[in-house]
Amino acid sequence: MLDTVDYVGHDSGTKKSVGKGTITVSDVSIVFGQGADEHRAVDNTDLIIGAGEFVCILGPSGCGKSTLLNSIAGYVKPTTGMVSVDDIKVEKPGPDRGMVFQQYSLLPWKTVFDNVAFGPRMAGISKRESSSIANTFLSMVGLTKFRHRYPAELSGGMQQRVGIARALANYPSVLLMDEPFGALDAQTRLTMQESLLDIWKESGTTVVFVTHDVDEAVFLSDRVLIMGAAPGRVVEDLHIDLPRPRDIDMVFEPAYIKARKSCLDIIRTESKRAFELQNQ
Ligand code: ADP
Ligand code: MG
């Protein structure tokens, strides 16, 4: 059951989250297993992500990206340290933190419209108001025409748009996305990246987006947090100095190429270190 939606700090009557969604990760370590099986998935990590920022967590498979994201979502409890959102300690999942996974996680027996209206209804918002919220966010993701369809009748990209609308319908101050476009073909992925930037701008939420794709991270972000493995930690916090609004032609610009190269250099150094460590 969802908690009551918190409209404080939300610009009432519009879709925009205002001044909320600051994430603080203080000295967080997350350890799985015990004794010989102990695995430090996230090690002594400190981070501040500002309200309204678009931040990507980039790193190879298994370096702890999902674990770190899940600690912000409230699905994983830090072994030591603390995560807070707007100075409130994260203890469990909540409607202030919307989550979008690679798997679309829609309710297959409900229409697109009902999938999006479901969160507000569960939060005790009237049917009329929930319908209006669903219409607002379906329009934002460009699916108004498809609102009476069922998830199985939509393409992967469209289903993921519904997933985003569904997360936004709770007016989260933070949108957490775990490789959300990983299952999509390259072309759909590009379109989704462009529309996500439009949606982000319109909704005003903080976005934390996990990916292992360097191009995706550079194209989308204000900042790229590059993680390394063994133990999992942020090895670099890279500011992406590209103007907005962005479009895909930007990938040919020198500033884009430079940012991409910086990411690749750091990833290469980090992979080499991990490889040497494994072979010691
Ligand atoms: P990524 O998302 O970067 O691919 P994960 O955060 O999923 O990496 O996992 C980081 C490490 O922690 C991996 O070695 C993974 O096997 C381990 N891990 C993740 N979740 C658990 C869990 N619930 N129990 C035990 N080990 C886990
Ligand atoms: Mg993962």
Image (spheres, rainbow, N blue to C red):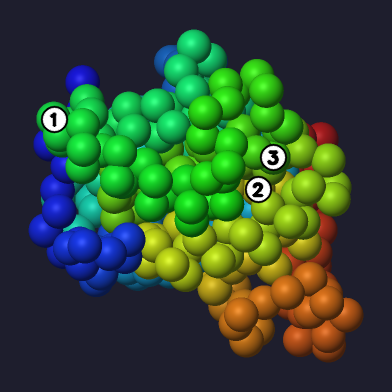
Do callouts 2 and 1 mark residues in contact (Cβ within 8 Å)?
Answer: no
Say whether disc 2 or disc 3 marks the residue closer to the N-terminus: 3
Name the residue type under label 1. Gly
In this rendering, the answer to whether 254 lies above or below 80 is below
The structure residue drawn at horizontal position 74% and vertical position 56%, both measured from the top left corner, is 191
Q: Which residue is mark 1?
A: 124
Name the residue type under label 2. Thr
Q: Position of residue 278 (x, y in %)?
A: 76, 35
- Label 3 Cα crowd, 10 Å radius (few <14 / some 14-19 / many 20+): some
Quadrant of the frame with the N terminus: top left
The structure residue drawn at horizontal position 34% and vertical position 33%, both measured from the top left corner, is 117
Residue 157, numbered circle? 3
Q: Position of residue 141 (x, y in %)?
A: 54, 51
Q: Which residue is mark 2?
A: 211
Total numbered badges shown on the rendered structure: 3
Q: Position of residue 28 (x, y in %)?
A: 35, 46
Is residue 6 shown to the viewer in this render? Answer: yes
In this rendering, the answer to whether 112 lies above or below 53 is above
Closer to us: mark 2 or mark 3?
A: 3
Question: Is the C-beta of the residue carrying label 1 under 8 Å from the nearest atom of ligand 1?
Answer: no
Name the residue type under label 3. Gly
Left or right? Give the position of 62 relative to 124.
right
Mark 3 lies on a secondary structure that is: helix
Say whether disc 3 or disc 1 marks the residue closer to the N-terminus: 1
In this rendering, the answer to whether 196 lies above or below 261 is above
Say whether disc 2 or disc 1 marks the residue closer to the N-terminus: 1
